[in-house]
Structure formats: structure tokens, C-alpha cells
Amino acid sequence: MKNDKFSYKTKGFDQVNSLKSKIKDFGNLIKSKRLIILLTIAVIGIIVLLGYSYKTKDSYKQSIENNYNMAFCQLVDNVQDVEVYLAKALISNAPESGTETLTYVWREANMAQTYLSMLPVSSSELENTAKFLNQVSDYSFSLSQKTIDNKELTQSDLDNLGKLHEYSVNLKNTLNQLSVDLNDGRITWSELTSDTGPALAKEVSNISKDSFGTVEENFHEYAGLIYDGAFSEHLTNPEHRGLTGEDIDEKSAMEIAINFWGADKIKEIKCDGITENTSIIAYNFSAKSVDGDAVWISVSKKGGHIVSANSNRNVNAEIISQENIDKIVEDYLNNKGFPNMKKTYFSKNNGVETINYAYEQNGVICYPDLIKVKIAMDNGEILGIETSGYLNSHTERNIPNAVITKDEAISKINEKVDVLAIDMAVIPTEFQTELTCWEIKGKVEDREFLVYVNIETGKEEDILVILNSAEGTLTM
């Protein structure tokens, strides 16, 4: 009996032990699965982290590329401005004008140095270029101080400016070519930062080492100096002299927009609201033409004048002659109520020509009264017009009689200028006033200029550089 009891107890212990063993095995299984899960989660986490790191690295790389591109574009613009202002300084014949122009050279050269330092090339690689920008900055500043004291520039000063200008032309042309190479993918910033890739400095410094050496020799005396289109930027007149008439409502403005573009050409139109935070308060309309092209028209609240109208479409050919284009636009302006407009400057881009017109009053060009017209060169369709300059400034002016004759005006400009033509013109100023001047078109070597001499005082008021190319004629 005792044995049976003992056997029963032993069997019970075996069952308990067996149960404990199974529980232990189950626990081990759970731990094993948990480990697998944890490992899986860890692997997924690593993959996600690597992916995020790669994406972040790629995004960071793109951000750096964008910064390099921005700095390079600014450098190109600043160097171009340095070249243009140096060209103006070479023909300026008035201390006041010379002071302003030389100050601009100093400013633009300083900005160019700043953006040059942001590029991924070592300072030693671009030492000559940086040195040139520093010298042209210092030298132009020193000459501007000289002209402030009403001292004329000596022939030596002008010779030095000429050498600086010559190098700036070469530098500008090389940077422009590098810009094309970068945009076309022939050169990348990653190549420029590597030891094996083509060096930006090599391209730039090889422009003209000899000419730079000559420039450098002329500035030893300044080595110790340390210094901590036309008129479009001046066409906002607060009087809005061309903005005549009473205020109109949205319905009337829509009718004006439809009639201006052509009721037979508009399929549908809607108002996008009114723009008030601009010089001209206007109703804005978006429309669709019968050909399916998008059209945008802006009509002034005061008087219901067309402020702008624009449509974009692909132009695949340049068929119409310049003579026919000029005739089409002239007739268009007359029909739209803008008579006596004279073509001034133009540009062409992808089969579309944009032409600037200024009002002409009794033979005097009034540049503040500016209208821009956009025309397709395949069929002569008018694609756009912008009249804000005209609406801001247009009025019949009391043109003063000239105190300074044409010959006297010509005698006041730099004797190096080969005069091609002279006319009278009204020009705007940065102070929102107007001046009546003799507009003297001239040429120095292969560069054309416009020099403006006040008809009452004989003062040289402004100089513009004419940029002629296959794409058009513009001024700076």
C-alpha cells in the first residue's frame, strides 16, 4: 500500500516535472520568436535608417548644388555689371557721372568677390581672379573719391581703367561659357571639387595671364588701400498721369477685357479678383481662347485701361520679316488707342519678339511712356501687351527750349566717342522726376553708347551701353 502511494506521488512529481519542462520549452520558444521579431524589427529599422540617411544625403547634396549654382549665377551677373560700368566710366566726361559709375564698379566687384568665395574651388586656384576683383574694387573706389573732389581723371587713370575693362571682358566671356557648360552638364560641381576633374580656375586663369600681369603692374601704388532696358526701373510715377477716368465695376472691366482681346477669340472668361497692393489697382481675368490657349488680362479699376494682356503658345518658326512685324505692331497700337509710339529696343526668344515702344511728342522721345508688345514670329499674332509705364506717366508735356545746342552737347561728351546720331528725349530719374536731354548715340571701338546731356544745363545725366545681338537690341 505504501509502495502504491509512493508510486502515485512519484508519478505526480514526474507529471509536474514534465509540465515544467513543457512550460520551459514554450518559454524558450516564445523567447526565440521574440528574438526573431526583435531582430526583424532591428533589420527593418536599419534599412529605414539607411534609406533615410541616403535620402538625406541626396537632399543635402542637391541643396549644396543649388547653393553653388546660385552663387555662380550671381558671380556671372556681377562680373557682367563690372564690365558694363567700366565701359561707361571710360567715356564719362563729367565728375558727377563718373563718381556714380565708379561707385557701381566698386559695389559690383565687391559682390562678385563674395559669391566667388562661395564656390567649391580653393582660393589658390582662383587667386588671379579674386585678386583682379579686389584690385578693380579698390581702384574704382579711389577714383570715385577723386571725382567727388571734382578732379578730372588723368590719361593714366583712363588707361588703367581700359586695361581693367579689357580683362573684365575676357573674364565675363569665360564665365558665360562656363555657365553654358554647367547648364548643359558638360561640367559638374562634383567634378570641380575633385582632384581629377576639370578645374574652374584652370579655365578662368588661362584667359589672359599676360594681360592680367600688365594690369597688376599698374596698381602697386594702390596695394596698401583697404576699403571696409532702358530706364524701366524708374517708370513708377505716383501721379499715374495716364490713368484717366472714373472707377468701374467688375462687370464693366470684364466687358473691356473681352472686347480688347476680341469677343470672337474668347471662349470663356472668369474674374480672379482684384489686385490692390500694386501701383495700379486692377481687375484680373483668366480666359480660354477658342484655340484652347490660356489668356490673362488685367484691367485698371480707374478708367478701365488695359494694364496687361498675355497669352503663351509654342511658336515653331520665324517666318515673318522684321519689316512686317514692325508694321503689324504699329497698326495694332494705333487701333488700340496708342498713337505716336516709336520703337526703341527689342528682344527675341523662342520665336517670340518683345518690342519696347516709347511715346513720341513732336519728335521728342518720351521714355517714361513705355509700352511693351509681344508678337509671334510665325503668323504675326499679338500675344501680349504691357502698358503700366504708359499709364503711370503719359501726358502731353511742355518740352522746354534747348539752351544747349546739339554741337555744344557733343562737345561736352568724351572726345573718344564717334557720334552716330543725336535726338531729343525725355528720360525718367530714380527720384521719379523727368529730364529733357540730348540723346547722343555714339561708338567707341566696337561698343555703342547712349549719352544723355541736359538741354538746359549741359550736364551729363546718364550713359547707357547698347547691347546688340542676334536676339535683339537692349540697353544697360
Image (spheres, grey):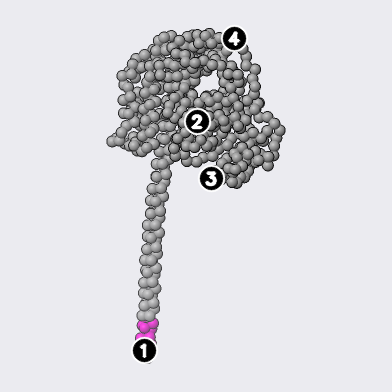
- Tell me the distance, in whole angstroms, between the alpha carbons under discs 3 and 2: 24 Å
Q: In this view, does 271 lie to the left or right of 195?
A: right
Secondary structure beneath dot 4 equals loop
Q: Nearer the viewer, mark 2 or mark 1?
A: 2
Residue behind mark 4: 403
Name which of mark 3 and mark 2 comes first in the sequence. Answer: 3
**In this view of the protein, which residue sits in the foreground, 212 or 56?**
212
Q: Which of marks 4 and 3 is in front?
A: 3
Q: Which mark is residue 4?
A: 1
Residue behind mark 2: 324
Q: What stretch is highlighted in magenta?
A: 1-12
Name which of mark 4 and mark 3 comes first in the sequence. Answer: 3
Q: In this view, does 318 lie above or below 469?
A: below
Q: Nearer the viewer, mark 3 or mark 2?
A: 2
Quadrant in the rendering for residue 21? bottom left
Q: Where residue 330 appears, x then y in whole percent?
A: 55, 29
Name which of mark 2 and mark 4 comes first in the sequence. Answer: 2
Secondary structure beneath dot 2 equals helix
